[in-house]
């Protein structure tokens, strides 16, 4: 089992010597000792294009899972991410902003409306779904979970899922897991400094 560690934002800043203090308030972030490789999976994005682990390479990404008919948690988390991205525009170059991936785990209901759903939050967001066997590969790979309940008499059913926001790097590997609610400014600062630390490490190799 991979040992993980929980960091405060201030501890992260001190550990990497990345400049002025941003305060001691904690954000809830879990980092693996080493970045974790995503498993192979084959899904489709909201434009009908293939979405595989390769789509994570070459840029930073924020990924969360849910379903389009989710009444509260998913809209909250996605709106929270919108705020984080807005704060990041003040800290990084536009081409360094992370792509945002929403993984819909209720494909029967998600696929037909996914394009409109993600566009409601940000036209740049990527909505992803597909067969449950492929969804399970990605969800497990990002240390998440979901469960589809049994249908009721009226045909409705419950969908349970984790709400974490997963941070993957340009190497296509998992670098951190953030737990909502996200403080937009503090998380944006954390992600910006994460990019700096990663860039330094790459240049030193």
Image (cartoon, helix red, strand yellow):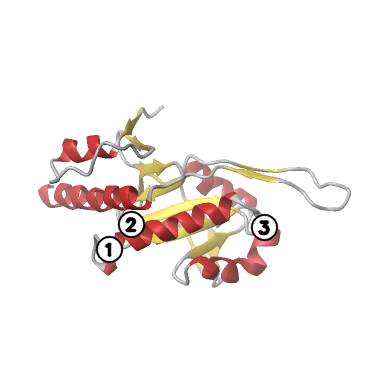
Query: For the view shown, which residue lies furthest in the left direction?
Result: 204
State the image coordinates of residue 158 (x, y, percent, origin top left).
72, 46
Q: Secondary structure at mark 1?
A: helix
State the image coordinates of residue 73 (x, y, percent, origin top left).
58, 49
Q: Secondary structure at mark 3?
A: loop
The residue positioned 29% from the left and 64% from the top of the image is: 89
Mark 2 packing: few (<14 Cα in 10 Å), some, or many (20+)? Answer: many
State the image coordinates of residue 9 (x, y, percent, origin top left).
28, 40
Residue 69 circle label: 3
Image quarter of the N terminus: top left
Give the mark toward the camera: 3 or 2.
Answer: 3
Residue 32 circle label: none
**Answer yes or no: do the residues labelled 1 and 2 have beta carbons within 8 Å?**
yes
Q: Which residue is mark 1?
A: 96
* Mark 1–mark 2 distance (CA, rounded to whole Å): 7 Å
Please tell me which residue lies in front, 52 or 112: 112
Q: Is residue 53 visible?
A: yes
The residue positioned 76% from the left and 48% from the top of the image is: 157
Residue 60 circle label: 2
Q: Secondary structure at mark 2?
A: loop
């Amino acid at each position: 089992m991979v040992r993980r560690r929980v960091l405060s934002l201030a501890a992260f800043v001190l550990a990497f010597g990345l400049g002025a203090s941003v305060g001691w308030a904690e954000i809830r972030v879990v980092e693996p000792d080493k970045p974790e490789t995503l498993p192979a999976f084959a899904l489709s994005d909201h434009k009908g294009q293939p979405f595989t682990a390769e789509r994570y390479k070459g840029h930073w990404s924020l990924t969360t899972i849910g379903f389009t008919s989710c009444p509260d948690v998913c809209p909250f988390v996605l709106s929270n991410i919108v705020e984080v991205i807005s704060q990041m525009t003040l800290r990084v170059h536009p081409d360094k902003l992370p792509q945002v991936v929403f993984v819909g785990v209720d494909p029967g209901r998600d696929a037909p409306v996914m394009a409109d759903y993600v566009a409601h939050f940000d036209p740049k967001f990527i909505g992803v779904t597909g067969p449950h066997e492929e969804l399970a590969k990605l969800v497990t790979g990002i240390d998440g979970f979901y469960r589809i309940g049994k249908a009721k008499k009226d045909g409705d059913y419950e969908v349970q899922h984790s709400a974490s926001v997963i941070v993957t790097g340009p190497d296509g590997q998992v670098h951190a897991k953030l737990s909502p609610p996200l403080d937009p400014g503090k998380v944006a600062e954390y992600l910006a400094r994460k990019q700096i630390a990663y860039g330094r490490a790459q240049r030193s190799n």
